[in-house]
Amino acid sequence: MRIGIDKMAFATTNDYLDLVELAKERGVDPNKFTIGIGQDLQAVVPPTQDIVTLGATAAKKLLTPELEKNISTVIVATESGIDNSKASAIYIKHLLGLSDFTRTVEMKEACYSATAAIQFAKGVVALNSQETVLVIAADIARYGLNTPGEVTQGAGAVAMLVSRNPHILTLEDTTVAYSKDIMDFWRPLYATEALVDGKYSTNVYIEFFLQTFTRYQQLTGRNLADFAALTFHMPFTKMGKKGLEGLLKDRNDEVAQRLRTQLTASQLFSRQVGNLYTGSLYLSLMSLLQNSDLRAGSRIGLFSYGSGAEGEFYTGILEDGYEHYMNNIQEELKHRHQVSVAEYEKLFSSQLGMSDRDIKLDVTNDPLPFVLKGQKDHQRIYEAK
């Protein structure tokens, strides 16, 4: 039985920041951001949006009345949880109006957990081929104003349906996971912004990619010529390039050139949105599929990484007509609203965060279909507009 990703959709906020403007404000050469880091624009989060509203917005683009009947499980992968106990999946399931006979769970392992969610979803479908699993990778990357990590912030959600006879990508059986207890990035319970050792994390990322890919080759006997493209987790787009070049080194034959060209296609959307944490790999996949001319039957390699640290390399085969089962991301990104650096700083500092106060937010100007209205009696209040 073929099992894999049947449909995909992406959602982000309506506001964005031009990183050239941020560089000028911070007294930094813009090339450091646009070339050195590989980012152009960054999603800016108003206080009326969080992982629940973004995740629900992405998922809504996938659903039809018929599909809703078959969804047995909702898995939300995130490192931006809004509650230490209650799963964000329950809020999203409610906003989407899914049946109460639906399993809901939240998963965490830094930026990696969406990949674990997909593997678990594959297992659910293997046990009952009539079921469909909704996997949502939703995150808001925050490092603080005027910090070294500020340029690698971002926000958004990728929603995916995992089912039998998928329309986008059939998952192959061989996967390689690799984990070590490493302190390259973490966020203590008392912190709203992450702590990171950037250079160390980059080196660990490359090491984990090489370890998992080499092990995959040993298990399968496949080589680079067997891949139409490789996609990467991209907290910033230069990271994907570092991973690929760590493998290719000085190689410059036809295969290497093809993989570099496809990497560029996979970077385009991340350059305009920023870091999605758990969703970054899957936005890269959507960017590849919507900005290249890959054919049905092509094998795509996916490298997932989460600090702390865990990596996984796995593969999928493209299905005929895959391009019809995703929302048009580039078209949607054209309609966002640019904010100034001052507006961005105000919005950044207006998040609900860890406050225990009753707060009522003005949702009048938020165009997304789901909004966070505030907090009352320690409970977040959501609304489907």
Image: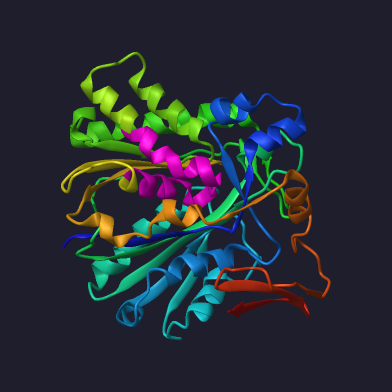
Query: Which residue is painted at 55% across and 36% down in the image?
Result: 39
Q: What stretch is highlighted in magenta?
A: 262-288
Residue 17 vs residue 270, the one in the foreground: 17
Measuring from the top left, give residue 309's x and y in whole percent. Answer: 52, 40
Q: Residue furthest top?
A: 250
Q: Which colour scheme is used?
A: rainbow
Indicate the quadrant where residue 363 lies: bottom right
Residue 166 appears anywhere in the view? yes
Q: In which quarter of the image is residue 118?
A: bottom left
Q: Residue at x 59, y 27 (%)?
A: 200
Tell me the residue at 37%/50% (across/down): 286
**Eyeballing the image, is 345 above or below 377?**
above
Outermost residue, right direction?
Answer: 357
352 with respect to 10 (left or right): right
Residue 338 place in picture, x, y as percent: 63, 50
Q: Is residue 197 magenta?
A: no
Q: Is residue 344 above or below residue 379?
A: above
Q: Quadrant of the N terminus?
A: bottom left
Nearer to us in this view, 282 or 185: 282
In percent of width and height, residue 128 lies at: 25, 73
Left or right of 126? Residue 285 is right
Predominant secondary structure, magenta span: helix
Which quadrant is the C terminus positioned in?
A: bottom right
Would residue 278 be counted in the magenta stretch?
yes
Residue drawn at x 46%, y 86% is 100
